[in-house]
Every structure is written in structure tokens, then in C-alpha cells.
Image (cartoon, grey):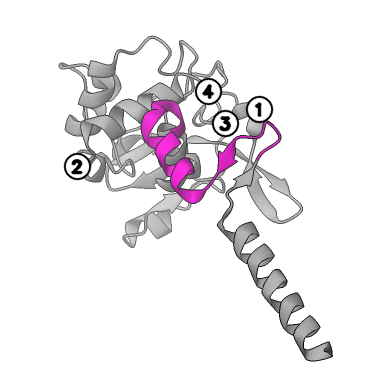
Amino acid sequence: MYSKFFAMLCIAAIVIISFCCSTPVGDATGVNITPDSVQQAAKEDPVKRGEYLVQVMGCDDCHSPKKMGAQGPEVDQELRLSGYPSSRPLPPIDKKNLSNGWMLFTGDLTAAIGPWGMSFSANISSDSTGIGNWTITQFKKALREGKLKGLDNSRPILPPMPWQDFRHLKDDDVEAIFAYLKTTKPVKNVPPAPKAPTNL
């Protein structure tokens, strides 16, 4: 008798567990959330796709000023994607290392020095001093052809910006990144102009 009861109890438990494991998890609104639905939403919403790409492509690494947090340097959310802060003084430059073939970065990676001279990361926030007034055509030209501000007669975008890699992005991805950047917090900031090697 006990064995029949135990067997029935086991069968009931298996049925309940199977049902629970096969039922998608719902959020607070009752909408079912599965890994597939998250991927589908990213495909259907260019802004979500763009946010994902900006994160995994490391745009914050160079374009966002950092501040020291409990776990070390972290993105300063108030200045996110605004490039090298125009009011920040530069640290002293060790020209001896440069003459030995080194490339140097500031502590938060928003400025770099190398054989090309000194370059500063651009403001890519949605402010007018960033990409707020850009068109998608300009954005594509900047990423595909390495043209400053995506303008035909402008200078090349300087290292370490890896536009040579980004030019292989699909149109949908470039458009998604642009759509997301247009939704970011606008931060007013005009990074300094680059310096030629002779002016360091």
C-alpha cells in the first residue's frame, strides 16, 4: 500500500515539475519571457539591438570618462559617452617612453598618444556637441570610411578608434547603434582638438 502511494506521489511530482519547467517565466505584467523572446525583441527593436552592440563593442571603454568606484574604475554615468572632458587637464607626458615606441593612454582611456600624435575620444552622446545633429549617412561614413563627423572633406579619424573593423558591420547594426546613441543622455562637451607629434 505504501509503495503504491509512494509511486503515485512520485508521478505527481514529475508531472508538476515537468509543467513548471516547460512554462515560460512571466514578468510583472504577465508577459512570458524566454531567451528566444529576448532575442526576438532585440531583432524587432533597433534601439535595444543598438544598446546591446554599444555594450559588447566596448564603446564605453574609450568614449566614457571614468571615476573610481568600490571595484576600481567605472563609467561616470553623468558623463557617459561624452568623450574626453574638455575641462580636464592632461597628465604629464613621458616622452622617453614615446621615443621607445610605446603608445600611451590616460587612466580612463579617453585620450591616447602614439606615432600619430595625441588624440581624444569624441563625444558620441545625443547632445548637439556629440552626434545629436548627425544624420545616419554621416554616421555610416564615419564608421565605414573613417571620416571625422562623417563629412566628405574632413580629416581621417585618428587611432585608437577601430573604424577599420567597424566598417564591416551590417547596415542594420550600424543603424541600430545610431538609433540607440540618439536616445542616450545628452552631455555637452567638446573634446580638445588632436595634437600633431611635433606639438607634444
Q: Which residue is mark 1?
A: 78
Q: Are marks 1 and 3 in contact (CB under 8 Å)?
A: yes
Percent of width and height locating residue 163: 26, 39
Q: Secondary structure at mark 3?
A: loop
Q: Which residue is mark 4?
A: 184
How far is the residue under mark 4 from the one under mark 2? Answer: 24 Å
Q: Secondary structure at mark 2?
A: loop
Q: Are marks 4 and 2 in contact (CB under 8 Å)?
A: no
Camera-nearest residue between 12 and 35:
12
Q: Residue furthest right?
A: 2
Q: Which residue is mark 2?
A: 168
Closer to the N terminus: mark 2 or mark 3? 3
Closer to the N terminus: mark 4 or mark 3? 3
Q: Secondary structure at mark 4?
A: loop
Which range of residues does the magenta coloring cover?
Answer: 27-48
Tell me: 148 left or right of 128. Answer: left
How far is the residue under mark 4 from the one under mark 3? Answer: 9 Å
Q: Magenta segment: does it hold 6?
A: no
Q: Can residue 194 be spotted in the picture?
A: no
